[in-house]
Amino acid sequence: MKTKILIFIFYSFCIITAKSQQMQIEKIWPNGPKELNGLTETINGKTTDTPQEALLYIYSPEKNKNNGKAVIFCPGGGYGGLAIDHEGHKFAQWLVNNGYTSIVLKYRLPNGNKNIPLADAQEALKIIRNKADELNIHPQKIGIAGFSAGGHLASTVGTHWSDTSVRPDFMILFYPVISTQKEYAHKGSFTNLLGTNFSESDRKAYSNDKRITSKTPETLLMLSDDDTTVVPMNSILFYEALKKNNVNATMYIFPEGKHGWGFNHQFRYHELMKTLLLDWLGRF
């Protein structure tokens, strides 16, 4: 009985919190996904409690603040976990107060199946576009943001699309994993995504700086110069490739902050980051 009471209190709290934040939760695959990642429990305490379920947490602004734009956030975690709080919910809860419909994507971890995170993210874009009228947003003003390995996922969405229904209208990449070049690659992310002994074709395909064309969405990159986890060359290579293809791009490299600052107030340039981000988003 005590357990049931605690569960009831927990879900009641979630409902109250969701209402206060104008947040709704939606399953990406209500009938179950086509591909499974083989995960049934947490790995090193880093995965979510529901490894087979992809979810959207949709934060909607007040009607009088709604600017008709939306951003889907992909948290990082090396494709082995999800930093869904400071690289997801906290960012969304701030941005929604600035008029943006803000969506946190709880994507499924790949466990070596490269198709799973991308399928979740692409389906998320379709869902949000299909709900554009309901959410009072413009279907061509929906962007994707990602942090670290979530930045790799976001940039994969922006560079691997073949159908405009899954093309984001802009990308925001925070200290993203980009390159598979040995001297720059974040080995753990690519091992989790592609498997231990991935092929040379996958190495080329998932080095997203090599996938850029003139139709790649406009991009903002934000990172720290002293990041030794995902070295700045990942972002620099992506920025250079964007410019070679005449795609509008902006990059801010903060002098310090290392890796994974997300929406942490302890990040020295937190307030400046917010100002620069809102200014850039105002272009759309």
Image (spheres, grey):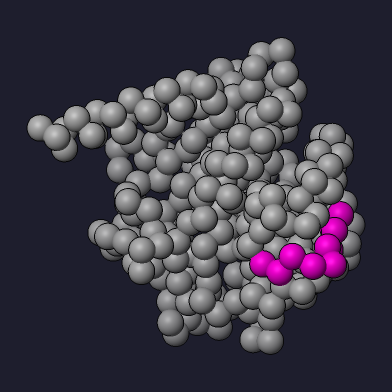
Residue in the image at 80% along x and 46% along y: 271
Indicate the position of residue 175 as horizontal and vertical percent values.
70, 63
**Image point (69%, 55%), residue name:** 266
Q: Quadrant of residue 168?
A: top right
Residue 76 screen position, x and y as percent: 56, 59
Residue 79 versus residue 115: which sits nearer the camera?
79
Left or right of 43? Residue 217 is right
The correct choice, above or below, for 25 with respect to 192 in the image is above
Which residue is rendered at x = 65% and y = 30% of the image?
96
Quarter-wise, where is residue 42 in the image?
bottom left
- Front residue of 100 and 254: 254
Whether the magenta-drawn stretch holds residue 256 is answered as yes
Q: Position of residue 200 (x, y in %)?
A: 55, 83
> Is residue 57 shown in magenta?
no
- Depth order, front residue of 15/232: 15
Considering the image in quadrants, where does the C terminus appear? top right
Coordinates of residue 233 in the picture (x, y in percent): 77, 75
280 versus 257 height, above or below: above
What segment is highlighted magenta in the picture? 250-259
Classify residue 278 by image quadrant: top right
